[in-house]
């Protein structure tokens, strides 16, 4: 199983480079990192179960209503690739299961 994320800044229309992100399961931090120049993190391998990706949006956006965005999701098929994109702005965000 592999997990990736891609964060886009809806205000600038550019990738959100350098955004701090962590992956958690059952209150434990499984992985931490920063998005690359293309706004991506790849290669995390969390396994089956319920996971949380925590995006530290407060340190990325100077003035935001959402200081952090937490996306909770379930991995049922550990052999499948999972992609969790985030479209971000100071007063809104959206996410979906990507491919």
Image (cartoon, grey):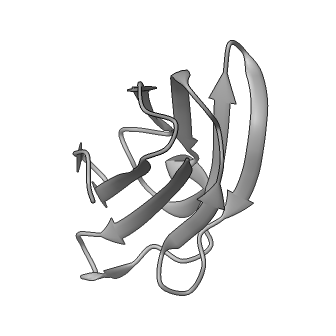
Whole-percent x and y of residue 13? 24, 82
Q: Based on the displayed image, in which of its 4 quarters is residue 12 positioned? A: bottom left
Along the line of sight, the residue nearer the viewer: 10 or 51: 51
Q: Nearer the viewer, residue 99 or 91?
A: 99
Q: Is residue 94 left or right of residue 78?
A: left
Considering the image in quadrants, where does the C terminus appear? bottom left
Q: Residue at x 55, y 47 (%)?
A: 1
99 displayed left or right of 80? left
Q: Is residue 10 above or below residue 86?
A: below
Task: Count up the numbered dots.
Answer: 0
Report x, y in % for residue 31.
75, 45
Residue 89 visible within the image: no
Kindly tell me whether residue 99 is visible in this rendering: yes
Left or right: 8 as drawn, with respect to 1: left
Identified at 42% across, 54% down, the residue is 63
Can you name the residue that lies furthest to the top here? 26
Q: Establish if 37 lies above or below 95.
A: below
Image position, residue 62 (x, y; %):
49, 61
Q: In the image, what residue occupies the spot 33% across and 70% down?
A: 8
Percent across and percent down for residue 57 are 50, 50
Viewer-nearest residue: 39 or 77: 77
Tell me what residue is drawn at x 68 percent, y 12 percent. 26
């Amino acid at each position: 199983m592999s997990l990736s994320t891609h964060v886009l800044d809806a205000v600038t229309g550019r990738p959100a480079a350098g955004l701090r992100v962590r992956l958690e399961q059952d209150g434990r931090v499984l992985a931490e990192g920063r998005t690359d120049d293309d706004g991506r993190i790849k290669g995390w391998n969390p396994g089956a179960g319920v996971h949380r990706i925590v995006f530290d949006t407060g340190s990325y956006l100077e003035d935001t209503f959402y200081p952090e965005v937490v996306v909770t999701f379930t991995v049922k098929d550990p052999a499948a690739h999972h992609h969790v994109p985030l479209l971000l702005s100071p007063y809104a965000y959206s996410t979906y299961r990507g491919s």
